[in-house]
Amino acid sequence: MSTETEYINIAFHNKASDLFFALYEKFQSSIKTIDREKEEYIFQQMREKYVRTLQQQLEMAAKDIIKNNQGHKQLNQVDQNLNLFIKEYLHRFVQKIKE
């Protein structure tokens, strides 16, 4: 992996981590008043909304990074890496919500 690719990966992870934790905090705040025994469907709707929002924001961040690195020799590999990272962040988000 080239140094430039590593830099791109780090830049994405920095942005993705910020998005992840900001949305997680907003999610936690938004469900404080939900009684899961009586309103599980509302919890599930909120979860899906925040997962979708995170996915959209991560995809936009990845597109910006790709756009800003058009001259990179291994752009296809970078794109594949970013898509894999997005899936990992979404999985971690869902897992964190279950805690």
Image (spheres, rainbow, N blue to C red):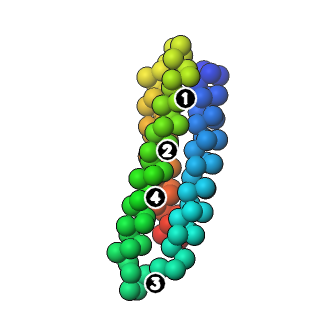
- The percent position of residue 22, horizontal first and vertical second, equals 61, 55
Q: Outermost residue, bottom direction?
A: 38
- The percent position of residue 18, horizontal first and vertical second, equals 63, 48
Q: Which amino acid does label 3 sit on?
A: Asp
Precedes in sequence: disc 1 or disc 3 = 3
Residue bearing mark 4: 50
Q: What residue type is labelled 2?
A: Gln
Q: Is mark 4 on a helix, strand or loop?
A: helix
Q: Report how far apart the C-alphas of labels 1 and 4 lie in the structure.
A: 22 Å
Q: Report how far apart the C-alphas of labels 1 and 3 lie in the structure.
A: 40 Å
Q: Is mark 3 on a helix, strand or loop?
A: loop
- The percent position of residue 83, horizontal first and vertical second, equals 44, 37
* Disc 1 and disc 2 in contact, CB within 8 angstroms: no
Residue bearing mark 1: 65
The answer to which image quadrant residue 13 occupies is top right
Q: Report how far apart the C-alphas of labels 4 and 3 lie in the structure.
A: 18 Å
Precedes in sequence: disc 2 or disc 4 = 4
Q: Is 51 placed above or below 3 here?
A: below
- The percent position of residue 35, horizontal first and vertical second, equals 46, 84
Considering depth in this image, is 5 or 39 the residue closer to the camera?
A: 39
Residue bearing mark 3: 35
Residue sitting at x 50%, y 58%: 93
Q: Is 59 placed above or below 34 here?
A: above
Q: Is mark 1 on a helix, strand or loop?
A: helix
Residue bearing mark 2: 57
Q: What residue type is labelled 4?
A: Tyr
Residue sitting at x 51%, y 26%: 66
- Packing grade of label 1 (10 A; few <14, some 14-19, many >=20) is some
